Image (cartoon, coloured by chain):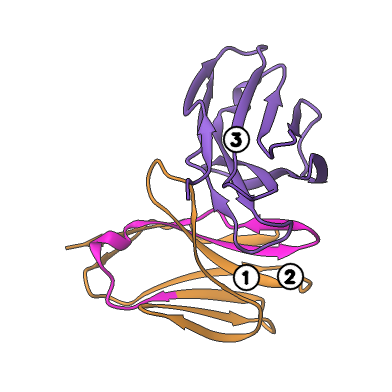
Chain colours: A purple, B orange
Amino acid sequence: KAGVTQTPRYLIKTRGQQVTLSCSPISGHRSVSWYQQTPGQGLQFLFEYFSETQRNKGNFPGRFSGRQFSNSRSEMNVSTLELGDSALYLCASSSQPGSYEQYFGPGTRLTVT
Amino acid sequence: QKEVEQDPGPLSVPEGAIVSLNCTYSNSAFQYFMWYRQYSRKGPELLMYTYSSGNKEDGRFTAQVDKSSKYISLFIRDSQPSDSATYLCALYWGNQFYFGTGTSLTVIP
């Protein structure tokens, strides 16, 4: 079974731009969560989607948004990029919300200059 | 105060040593507890999970939870160079996972 895939793997953007990251979950998984990982703050929860509905949202500004499609693929968008948005963005899929068995993708490394 | 606190290390041990990794947490409502391992340039992978206080063993790995002290530990016996990675604790409550910042471990051959 193929794992979680994230595209692109690396991205360099300029302050003020916007960016869209993509995540394809494991086949059959309908729950997708997004996390931001930085050296100082560690892994922080952004949001979770299940069956195209946002189920839960972390404590991030409205510039961070996401969506999920009918095939369970998910995208997250960050508008008006700031230097502090530089991070590794990780996507995790699971068969159902709240499952301890989350499978992470390799992440997208975003650098904002 | 963060929900989960974890010593970032780094931790460096000789091959064969017993490693102890620890996290403390503040919310007694946390329902279950996990440890993840993250190699460089990879996403975290689930190592172990447990629901209750006490010990859970899986091969060279033992997860320990003390709910009364709000303290969780991961022990690695007979550590190997392949164990060199960052280890993250994770706790679940209220439809959300809370992660520690991770402890970087290097096992020296």
Dot 2 corresponds to which residue?
Answer: B30
Q: Is residue A47 visible?
A: yes
Above/below status of A15 relative to B91: above
Hey, which quadrant is residue A18 in on the image?
Answer: top right
Residue B55: give x, y in percent of width and height. 53, 86
Label 3 packing within 10 angstroms: few (<14), some (14-19), many (20+): many
Dot 3 corresponds to which residue?
Answer: A23
- Looking at the rendering, the stretch of residues picked out in magenta corresponds to B75-103
Which element carries disc 3, helix, strand or loop? strand
Which element carries disc 2, helix, strand or loop? loop
State the separation of the CA atoms marked 1 and 2.
Answer: 8 Å
Q: Are marks 1 and 2 in contact (CB under 8 Å)?
A: yes
Chain under numbered label 2: B
State the separation of the CA atoms marked 2 and 3.
Answer: 28 Å
Q: Residue at x 51, y 75 (%)?
A: B73
**Which kind of residue does numbered mark 1 sit on?**
Phe
Q: Are marks 2 and 3 in contact (CB under 8 Å)?
A: no
Dot 1 corresponds to which residue?
Answer: B33
Hey, which quadrant is residue B33 in on the image?
Answer: bottom right
Q: Is residue B52 magenta?
A: no
Q: Residue at x 66, y 76 (%)?
A: B70
Residue B106: give x, y in percent of width and height. 30, 58
Chain under numbered label 1: B
Q: Is residue A113 visible?
A: no
